[in-house]
Image (cartoon, rainbow, N blue to C red):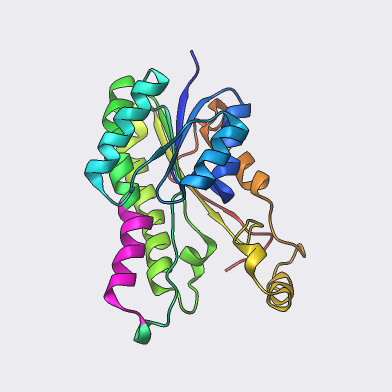
Amino acid sequence: MKKIALVSGGTRGIGAGIAKALNNAGYAVAVNYNSNAAAAQSFSKETGIPAFSWDVADFDACEAGVMTVCSALGGDIDVLINNAGVIRDAMLHKMDPASWRFVLETNLTSVFNMCRIVVPKMREKQYGRIVNISSINGLRGQVGQTNYTAAKAGIVGFTKALALESAAKGITINAIAPGYISTDMTETIKSDILEQIVDTIPVGRFGRVDEVANAVLFLVGDTAAFITGMVLSINGGQYM
């Protein structure tokens, strides 16, 4: 029987790449999305991977969503990838409380919500794999991103604590902290700004989505069963 994997924010960018890689590796995959139904429909049509809509910042919506996924795929979640995220950048002295709350709830509280729902079943089965997507900026900070950086740093601490709680139950929890990765978001950045960013990356280019996805495949696989509570930074040499 195929292991069941769920990827939040899985219809675009890094999340879509991870979902496709898991699907190609033989997992039964479902993805979550919130607002872009057109992108979700296009993704599902292209890949055959079902997409389910709910707000990961809402615990009750997550609970209902996970139940729907489990029913559709015929079992409990074996692999959870917490990828959903948003940005609302501003300097702190100009940041409004709503932007702070929105980013913290979507990027960090969502990780609690999803893990709180799937971990009990994983503990019963004595098996589970969770990978939380943090960011290089959660490790080093970034101007104009106190909300985003706080959330992504929080994911690191959350990952390490939950890994300790879960290790004896056959569950591994790790985090990946990507640097600059080529996605549809980076395509909107002006060329001169892109060049400035590339100049800061020792390997001389942006990362590829498949390079992040392959790291996820490794961490959820059996060969990584002795790895938990770790943060793998995929950043082309941009050391902090």
Seen from the viewer's position, the closer of residues 163 and 26 is: 26
Q: Residue at point 45% right, 74% down? A: 89
Q: Position of residue 151 (x, y in %)?
A: 38, 62
Q: Classify residue 207 as left or right of residue 224.
A: right
Residue 181, by quadrant, is bottom right
**Residue 126 appears in the figure:** no
Q: Classify residue 55 as left or right of residue 149.
A: left
Q: Position of residue 17 (x, y in %)?
A: 60, 42
Q: Is residue 92 above or below residue 122?
A: below
Q: Is residue 121 above or below residue 34?
A: above
Residue 182, by quadrant, is bottom right
The region drawn magenta spans 95-109
Quadrant where the C terminus is found in the figure = bottom right
- Identify the residue at the far bottom of this view: 93
Q: Residue at point 58% right, 50% down? A: 13
Q: Position of residue 160 (x, y in %)?
A: 38, 49
Q: Position of residue 236 (x, y in %)?
A: 69, 59
Q: Residue at point 35% right, 25% down? A: 70
Q: Is residue 152 above or below residue 167?
A: below
Q: Residue at point 33% right, 48% down? A: 55
Q: Does the magenta segment cover residue 100?
A: yes
Q: Classify residue 54 as left or right of residue 186.
A: left
